[in-house]
Image: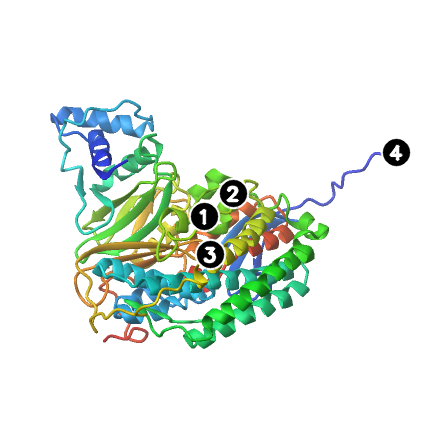
Amino acid sequence: MTNEALQQLIGSWFPNPEVDEIPQIIENLETSEVLEENVESSKPINPSLLEFTEEGSQFLSILVQPEHLYALMNQLKLNKQTHFDYLFCLSGVDWGEELGVVYHLESTTHRHSIVVNVKTKNRENPNFDSICDIWRTAEFHEREAFDFFGIKFNNHPNLKRLFLTEDWEGFPLRKDYVDEINMVIK
Amino acid sequence: MQPTIANTNFKTEPYQINMGPQHPATHGVLNLLLTIDGEIIKKVEPDLGYIHRSIEKMCERDSYQQIVHLTDRMDYLSSNINNEAVCLAVENALQLEIPERVKVIRTIIGELTRISSHCLWWGVMGMDVGALTTYFYGFRDREMLNDIFEETCGARLTMNYNVPGGLMLDIHPNFVKRVKKFVAHFKTKIPEYDRLLTDNVIFQKRTKGVGILSKEDAISFGVTGPVGRASGYSCDVRKYHPYSALDKVTFKECLKTEGDTFARYQVRIMELWESLSIVEQLIDNIPEGEHRVATNAVIKLPKGEYYQKVETARGELGVYIISTGTKNPYRLKFRSPGFSNLSALNHMAVGGKIGDLVATMATLDLVIPDIDR
């Protein structure tokens, strides 16, 4: 599927008409029922739920609000037209003011790729929904993001430090991390 | 016949035992926390980080030329392919036109690296299941390759031969001659490998039906490389996202459907033949030309995000660079194949015996610095 077609299809899951329609759509997504029919793409996307961008990246990129992350991911995996069954990279990123996670997805049947971004301004207690019941590889990758960025993943079965020891203080890959002994600042 | 009397005086209960970090079958400093009941494995929990060096954090303060040197230290058995991944990512971001000569040499050395890595794997695989001779055979053939690398790249293991824009030096005048000699030599040796280990009945009984991973689980766990292909998951980056000169050669993707330890073994042996064939197709036709194009002394990538995949000997290595337009990456993530492959170990080992776990781990071909980074 081309990037334009993907953008139209995924956008149609989050339409932007009257406000009262939105809760109903979200409900649909959470039942993990596969949307078979092609929703007509004339409806504009709700920019408060997700944004598309193709700038500065070779993949189509989505920025989604944290509360809709799980529903979107579940739909991306289960929908037969998108069928993103391979999560090939999950990276935590410290964007400065925000902390975020970047998910790289690929479909092994259609061979198209997509990037999903999620960000939060809450640096004290950042948390997103875990997706490790959708892609099991996420279990280790989310633990790595927790270890280095302190991002918590709700409903993760075993969220604890992966590389560092349990009593390590701070999250080393954050930009504001300081360690005067071990870090060489140039 | 007397009925067997069940022992009701003693009951079993699960207990925990440490395998590693100094266990020879873990191939490095990997600690596995096993929960076992008798000899049956209930749970495998890897304890990582013994040699974590935070390469990703170091990359954030280094220039792109310096980062290449760090990648050798991840998966040191496919060091040249790791170097290539970073160089390709930087070159694609800068939209540099790379000479054909560079592409062909990179592919040849990449495939030779793969053969060298599989030789070592074959040696230690045999040793893990109790056949010591394989170790010497594997290392004997690998030695020839290391000599070739030493002559051309100046190093035997951590090669640092690639730089953004091309190669550090041109190939040594002996390179073509010696590679041809190796190819001819190694073609007579793979059947020897088969006679010694593949057809061995004891070996087959140790490996067939052990550590099974289905195709669906392989995809879900993000398992790539020979491990994924042994489960019937077609995941060869060289086929789907060809880089360097791989779009000019013909080779077949080695697939098996059994998903057990023996299938993973067979896939790697088949890959030896395919890699030899790729080298043979290219070695006579190395184009003339420059071995490097000039880049700025300080490389600054345009603002944006770049992702480059390559196929190392262990699977898919991803380099994810976020650049803000400065001379250092804002964030650099290595998606290492060993890390994802290891995450499937618990799933594959539960219900088996400890001896089976050793055989399963041997075919996962873990390199611990690749996991810890």
Kind of residue sitting beneath label 4 = Met
Mark 2 residue type: Ser
Residue at mark 4 shares a chain with residue at mark 3: yes
Q: Residues within 10 Å of mark 2 (few under 14, many from 20)?
A: many
Work out whether mark 1 precedes mark 3 in sequence or the reverse, and give the earlier one: 1
Residue A38 image label: none
Mark 1 surroundings: few (<14), some (14-19) or many (≥20) residues within 10 A: many
Q: Secondary structure at mark 1?
A: loop
Query: Label 2 near label 1: C-beta < 8 Å?
Result: yes
Q: Are marks 4 and 2 on the same chain?
A: yes
Q: Name the residue tied to disc 4.
A: B1
Query: In front: mark 4 or mark 3?
Result: 3
The amino acid sitting under disc 3 is Ile
Residue marked by disc 3 = B278
Instruction: Report the amino acid beneath label 1.
Output: Val
Q: Chain of mark 3?
A: B
